[in-house]
Each structure stands twice: as structure tokens, then as C-alpha cells.
Image: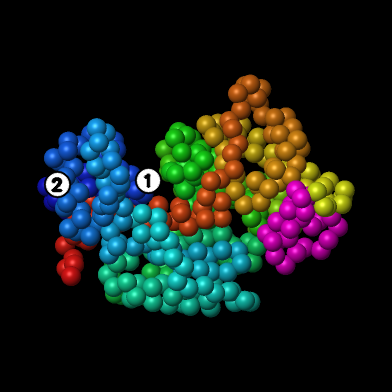
């Protein structure tokens, strides 16, 4: 890309990323944030409107009685397709620059392996792209398993191992060259919290998702630290637990086995549940409502203590400014606050204990992985080179 073209689109990239982070931001506020003069802002916004990248809406009155406008997604602007490969099934969603998301397809895995169902997901992505001709400019897979590049390394709760996820973007022939980005669901949830959630503004943030096991990410400046292969953040497989317990991942003593629905079932003397996430929600919900027997309360307190102690260990390791938790973790904390708090404090090194980083419930909750996936997609879509390619397309 020529330097002149790159410079032409660099400020546009900054503005569009700001709009994605803060949909509906007032044009005057955006100009101040980017240090743009009113004339430069007017020219830029008009250019982006003409390129179907931005829409402008009347937003009341600004300072000194002057009307102002808010900035959002153009109704025919670029889209990110998200293939959400969760623990219980898959979904395909489309999202725009302003954060509007629509589910367009969903399905279950049954007893199939990835090679058997991924073509079905790819066909749904392709149908979504063809339904919005030319608009899908990135595909992001949010995966509830360990990933590296465009490969699934391990989905231990289902016994899946390596699989090629590249097929998910292979069907978007309507738009050649659409990139496929892949992220672990907990990592993507962390991106959402660091950029527009409970960890916004934190220089270093630790995010944890308790679903079927524990995943997470350390984020620095809103970007995840994912390791040499992109598979970092598998915190649930740290040996914080009982070494006598074998984990489906192949290791022993994993933290996973102390804090999720499988752990609650074991503490209660139940067999491993078919749906550990739903089981965990039910048990925790009953304890929070005050209708659960004493044994269930003890089970939840045991899991909350294990969660608090593990969070403390990760704070000692990473030294974050803030910690956010999602999935079952907010419910565990709320159902057994004293058990969590005591274990968290006891596990901290003395200098951390004097001023511990706050632990906050995730703002985006179960939507976090999809929100983070959209963030990755629009990082790609709003890069200067990608904007130049979009603007060069015929927009009729």
C-alpha cells in the first residue's frame, strides 16, 4: 500500500475504531479525542459516509446550544461474521461497526467430531456472507478450547484434539481474501472487558471464565498475551488441585476440576453431569435463593474457596491492575462471598494483600466472547489497508 494512501486512511482507522469502542459517540467528542479541527473532522466524516463506513445521526444539542451528531455504523457498511463454537453447540452471528449483532444460524454437535460438523458451520458462514453481498470482511471463530493460529489444539471437555478451522472462511467466495481469525472464548471475553467492560482503562487486566473448566487471559493495553503458539491462558490446567484427579486434558490435579459444575457434582456426591454448565448454574442458583440444603451450600463454599485461592495465585503471577470474572464465577462469589474473599486474601503475597487488585464481575457476561470476536474482526476491517480496499469496491 503506498505511503500516501496509508496516511490518507490512518486517521479514518482511528476514528472508526473509536466508534466501534463507543458506539453513538458524539462527533464533537470524537474530534476532541483525536485532536481534529472541525474542518478536518467534517471532511473525514463526509468521506467515510460516502464510503459506507460511517453513519451520522442528530443527537440533540451540544455546547452553546449548537446541534451535534452521533456516529455509528453505516447501514450498508462492513460486517464481521462470528462462528461461536461453544461447549454446547455452535452459532453464526453477524455484527456491525456499532455493535449490533444478529444470530443467523445455530446447530448442535451431537456425537460428531469437528471434521464432521465444521463443513456445516462453514456453509452457514457462507450463506450469511452471500445474504449480505460484499459486506462480510472478516470471519472470527470463538472457540471454547485451546487454539493456535487457525487450528483447534484441544477441546478437552468433548475429547476433541487437533482440527483445522480454516474451512470456516473457505466458503466466503463472494468476497475473496476474507481473513479468518481464531480466538479462545475466554481470551475473547477478556478483550471485551478490557476494551469496553469492567477492566476498561486497566493497563494490565486478568480475565477468567469459569464454564466447563477455567480459561482466561492476561491483557496488556487491551491486547491478550497468548504465548508462542497463541494457546496461552489455559489457567484451568494449572496444578492447583488434587493430583489424584485426572483431567480430560491429560494432566492431573487441574484447577478446572475444583471450581466448575463437575466439581460441584463431585462435592455433592452426584455423577458427572451431562451439562456441567447448566448443572452449576442450577446448584449455585438454589444456594443464592436460600432454598438449597446445607450440603449444597458446603459444595458451593468449597468451589468458591478454590476459585479465590486460584485467583490469588494468578495475581501473584501476573500483578494485574484489575481482575474480571465471568461464567459461573460471579455466581460462586455471590453465593459464598466470605469463602471467596477469605481464600483470595489468604493466597495473596503480603505486598498484594495491602492493596489487592479489585475483582469485578464481567460487564458483558455470556456475550463477552462474541463481543471480543467482533473487536478482533473490526481491528482487521478498520486497518488502513483494509479500509482502502473497501473504499475501492463499487458501492451501488
Q: Is residue 287 magenta?
A: yes
Disc 2, SS: helix
Residue 65 sits in quarter: top left
Disc 1, SS: loop
What secondary structure is the stretch in magenta mostly built from? helix
> As drawn, is 324 to the left or to the right of 202?
right
Question: Over which residues does the magenta segment extend?
Answer: 264-289
Mark 2 touches mark 1? (CB < 8 Å)? no
Residue 342 sits in quarter: top right
- Residue topped by disc 2: 43
Q: Earlier in the sequence, mark 2 or mark 1?
A: 1
Name the residue nearer the viewer: 74 or 356: 74
| Residue 22 numbered mark, or none | 1
Q: Is residue 376 magenta?
A: no
At a point 43% along the width and 61% down the height, the residue shown is: 101
Name the residue nearer the viewer: 26 or 105: 26
Residue 80, placed above or below residue 61 = below
Q: Residues under labels 2 and 1: Cα distance?
A: 21 Å
- Using a 10 Å C-alpha cutoff, classify the residue at mark 1 as few (fewer than 14 neighbours), some (14 to 19) or many (20 or more): some
> As drawn, is 285 to the left or to the right of 162?
right
Residue 359 visible, this orientation? yes
> As drawn, is 220 to the left or to the right of 233?
left
Residue 231 visible, this orientation? no
Residue 309 sits in quarter: top right
The quarter of the image holding the C terminus is bottom left
At a point 69% along the width and 61% down the height, the residue shown is: 278
Residue 125, placed above or below residue 62 = below
At a point 44% along the width and 65% down the height, the residue shown is: 102
x then y, percent, for residue 152: 51, 63
x then y, percent, for residue 40: 15, 41
x then y, percent, for residue 337: 73, 38
Amino acid at each position: 500500500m503506498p505511503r500516501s494512501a496509508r496516511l490518507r486512511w490512518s486517521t479514518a482507522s482511528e476514528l472508526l475504531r473509536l466508534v466501534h469502542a463507543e458506539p453513538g459517540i458524539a462527533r464533537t467528542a470524537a474530534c476532541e479525542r483525536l485532536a481534529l479541527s472541525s474542518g478536518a473532522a467534517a471532511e473525514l466524516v463526509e468521506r467515510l459516509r460516502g464510503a459506507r463506513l460511517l453513519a451520522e445521526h442528530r443527537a440533540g444539542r451540544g455546547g452553546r446550544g449548537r446541534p451535534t451528531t452521533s456516529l455509528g455504523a453505516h447501514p450498508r457498511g462492513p460486517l464481521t461474521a462470528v462462528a461461536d463454537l461453544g461447549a454446547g453447540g455452535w452459532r453464526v452471528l453477524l455484527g456491525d461497526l456499532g455493535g449490533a449483532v444478529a444470530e443467523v444460524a445455530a446447530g448442535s454437535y451431537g456425537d460428531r467430531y469437528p471434521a464432521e460438523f465444521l463443513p456445516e458451520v462453514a456453509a452457514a458462514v457462507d450463506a450469511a456472507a452471500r445474504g449480505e453481498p460484499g459486506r462480510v470482511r472478516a470471519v472470527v471463530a470463538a472457540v471454547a478450547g485451546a487454539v493456535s493460529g487457525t487450528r483447534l489444539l484441544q477441546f478437552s471437555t468433548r475429547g476433541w484434539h487437533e482440527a483445522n478451522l480454516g474451512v470456516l472462511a473457505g466458503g466466503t467466495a463472494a468476497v475473496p481474501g476474507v481473513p479468518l481469525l481464531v480466538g479462545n472464548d475466554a481470551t475473547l471475553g477478556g478483550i471485551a472487558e478490557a476494551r469496553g467492560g469492567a477492566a476498561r482503562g486497566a493497563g494490565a487486566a486478568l480475565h477468567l471464565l469459569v464454564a466447563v473448566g477455567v480459561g482466561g487471559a492476561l491483557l496488556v493495553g487491551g491486547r491478550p498475551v497468548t504465548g508462542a503458539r497463541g494457546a496461552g491462558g489455559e489457567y484451568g490446567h494449572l496444578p492447583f488441585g488434587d493430583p489424584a484427579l485426572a483431567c480430560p486434558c491429560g494432566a492431573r490435579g487441574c484447577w478446572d476440576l475444583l471450581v466448575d459444575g463437575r466439581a460441584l457434582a463431585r462435592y455433592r456426591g452426584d455423577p458427572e453431569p451431562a451439562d456441567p454448565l447448566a448443572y452449576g448454574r442450577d446448584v449455585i442458583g438454589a444456594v443464592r435463593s436460600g432454598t438449597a440444603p446445607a450440603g449444597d451450600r458446603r459444595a458451593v463454599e468449597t468451589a468458591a474457596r478454590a476459585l479465590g485461592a486460584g485467583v490469588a495465585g494468578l495475581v501473584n503471577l501476573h500483578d494485574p491492575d484489575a481482575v474480571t470474572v465471568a461464567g459461573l464465577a460471579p455466581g460462586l462469589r455471590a453465593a459464598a462471598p466470605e469463602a471467596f474473599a477469605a481464600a483470595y486474601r489468604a493466597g495473596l503475597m503480603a505486598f498484594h494483600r495491602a492493596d489487592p487488585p479489585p475483582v469485578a464481575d464481567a460487564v458483558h457476561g455470556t456475550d463477552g466472547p462474541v463481543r471480543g470476536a467482533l473487536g478482533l474482526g473490526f481491528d482487521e476491517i478498520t486497518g488502513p489497508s483494509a479500509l482502502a480496499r473497501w473504499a475501492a469496491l463499487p458501492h451501488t
